[in-house]
Amino acid sequence: IFEAGYTVQKQHFFNNLGTITLFAVLGTLISTFVISYLTYLAALAGLITINTTNPMELLMFGALISAVDPVATLAIMGSSEVKCDPLLYSLVFGESVLNDAVSIVLFHTFADENKRNEIYTIQNIPATLLNFAQVSLASLCIGSVVGLTCSFIFKHTDIRTYPKFEIGLLFLFAYGSYAFSEALHLSGIMALFFNGLILSHYNYFNLSTTSKVTAESILSSMSSLSENFVYLNMGMGVFTGRFKNWDPLFIILAIIFCLIARLLNTFPCSYLTNLWREEKITGQMQVVMWFVGLRGAIA
């Protein structure tokens, strides 16, 4: 998450920040509720066996499975041979980066509601969404303040003459934003992402030449390893018998539900954003954005 914020293409990201935020926040909310409701209907129809008395479990599933991570698509779209539209690439990348953080915050919000063991009704949804908004905003502020503090220290000291300590301090500030947010029962993930964004924008030019190259290389390697460890853990789990109950029909239905939910958030959000955008999101772009909503390590 930190690497995604630190290496994001800032010009394209900030130029399309309103559109990206709409897709990442409103789109994820739509996707979460659509997948949860369709899963609930499938359970009522007797197609799958899950607990339908607790809607929070369904919402938690919907929130996690809504985390898109189109790494493979971006790798293809980023190649010079494809000649992908910069706007399309920026929107897909920006949404996938911010959407991961939103999904995790949403999941934790529903998980906290679930721990209360209260009867959850549709009247509780506005309060849940308000809590989600408060947690996200507070986490964003913490990540930004810690990032600005780090940038100020790096600018007004001679730590750049000691690259080893420079990189170590950079990573400690990143972890500090995460730990501080979690200590306050906020979202460390959201704070970490915006901390990376602030550090890359304000602190990058305070670093020594050695640290600029080294920090990006280390972050990229650790990010790749982290995702690979997730898949490795799942693969080992399959062969060691940790996953004993399989439901092939549920897997197929979940994929269909993800496609439907993606359809119902991509096109309406594109219509809304085209109302104020000068450079419109074309129909072809919208179809591509619908299909690139692949699920990755977070989901």
Image (tube, rainbow, N blue to C red):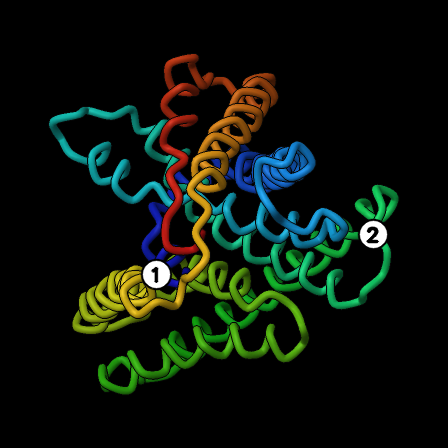
Whether residue 158 can be seen here:
yes
Residue 216 against residue 296 in the figure, above or below: below
Can you say which quadrant of the picture contains the N terminus? bottom left
Residue at image position (16%, 34%) is 79
Element marked by disc 1:
helix
Residue 43 picture location, percent across and down: 64, 39
Query: According to the image, label 2 marks what residue?
Result: 120
Residue 40 picture location, percent across and down: 67, 39
Residue 268 against residue 95 in the figure, above or below: above
Cβ–Cβ below 8 Å for labels 2 and 1?
Answer: no
CA distance separating discs 2 and 1:
37 Å
Residue at image position (54%, 66%) is 143
Q: Is residue 159 left or right of residue 94?
A: left
Q: Which residue type does callout 1 highlight?
A: Glu
Residue 232 picture location, percent across and down: 27, 64
Q: Which label belongs to residue 276?
A: none
Query: Which picture quadrant has residue 265?
Result: top right
